[in-house]
Image: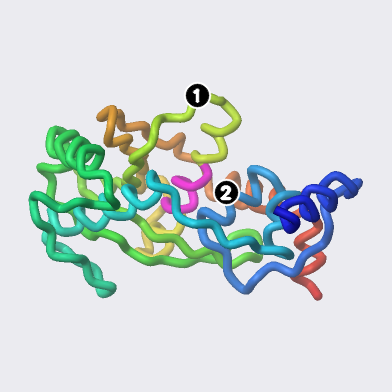
Amino acid sequence: MEDARVLIREANARSGPDLVELPQHLSASATLALTRSPGEFALNLRRPIPHRPSPEARVGTEFHGWVEHHFNMPTLMGSPEWDEDEDAAGAPQRFAELRARFLESEWALRAPLSVEENLETMIGGQLIRCRIDAVFRRDGEIWVVDWKTGREPRDRAEIEIRQLQLEIYRLAYARANGIPIAEVKAAFHYVATGVTQASGLWQESEIERRILDALESQGALESLSG
């Protein structure tokens, strides 16, 4: 509790975001955290506090592993042997519901080009790594799909921040495969509700601008240059 109070006092005392030296690479999720709140991101980077995975996060992790098994395409990291009665993350009912809803979706019947694909690309002078849940060819088009086991966001600002994740995935996949970004589409599939939300198909320049804005908002570019 004392550590939490210290961090709160530090956050309240700051008049603006502090300079922090970014790591050599950022994950796509870390990039979203930077975009969402540069000050909080900087604070967490300076004074990281370990968090126990929430039950929801654990179910999400287990679900992603099960999807790999469903497509019979385990990654090099391996995926567990799944049993129909698997007590995933101590929440068997929630896990069973997600499996059932996924099997009702159009994606369950499609053969993916890849699952859990690790890619990295340089955007705005920052190396960003991402793990793409699945890639499909749908109606002659390439689709990058990210499984979401939570609810769709309703806040417009949060929707736009999450959109950046898909756009990073599109750019990384296009570059890795030597194809124009316009030929890659992307979507979140919210498993529990069966809703698929497609990306807005930003231009590469727009993605670069969003990342640069996030970096500049907390002085990170100065840190990168030394």
Identify the magenta region: 164-170
Q: Secondary structure at mark 1?
A: loop
Instruction: Identify the residue position indicated by label 2 in the image.
Output: 32
Callout 2 crowding tier (Cα within 10 Å): few <14, some 14–19, many ≥20: many
The answer, for residue 201, to whether it is visible in the render is yes
Position of 157 compared to 10: left or right?
left
- SS at mark 2 in the image: helix
**How many badges with numbers are in the image?**
2
Asked if the magenta segment contains residue 202, the reply would be no
- Give percent across and percent down for residue 147: 32, 44
Foreground of the two, 2 or 122: 2
Residue 167, percent across and down? Answer: 48, 46
Residue 135 seen in the figure: no
Q: Are marks 1 and 2 in contact (CB under 8 Å)?
A: no
Quarter of the C terminus within the rendering? bottom right
Q: Nearer the viewer, residue 180 or 223?
A: 223
Is 168 magenta? The answer is yes
> Residue shown at 77%/65% (left/top)?
20
Say which amino acid is labelled 1. Arg
Question: Could you say which is closer to the camera, residue 107 or residue 44?
Answer: 44
Rendered residue at 68%/58% (across/down)? 44
Q: Earlier in the sequence, mark 1 or mark 2?
A: 2
Could you tell me which residue is drawn at 84 percent across and 53 percent down? 10
- Which dot marks residue 154? 1
Position above or below: 122 against 159: below
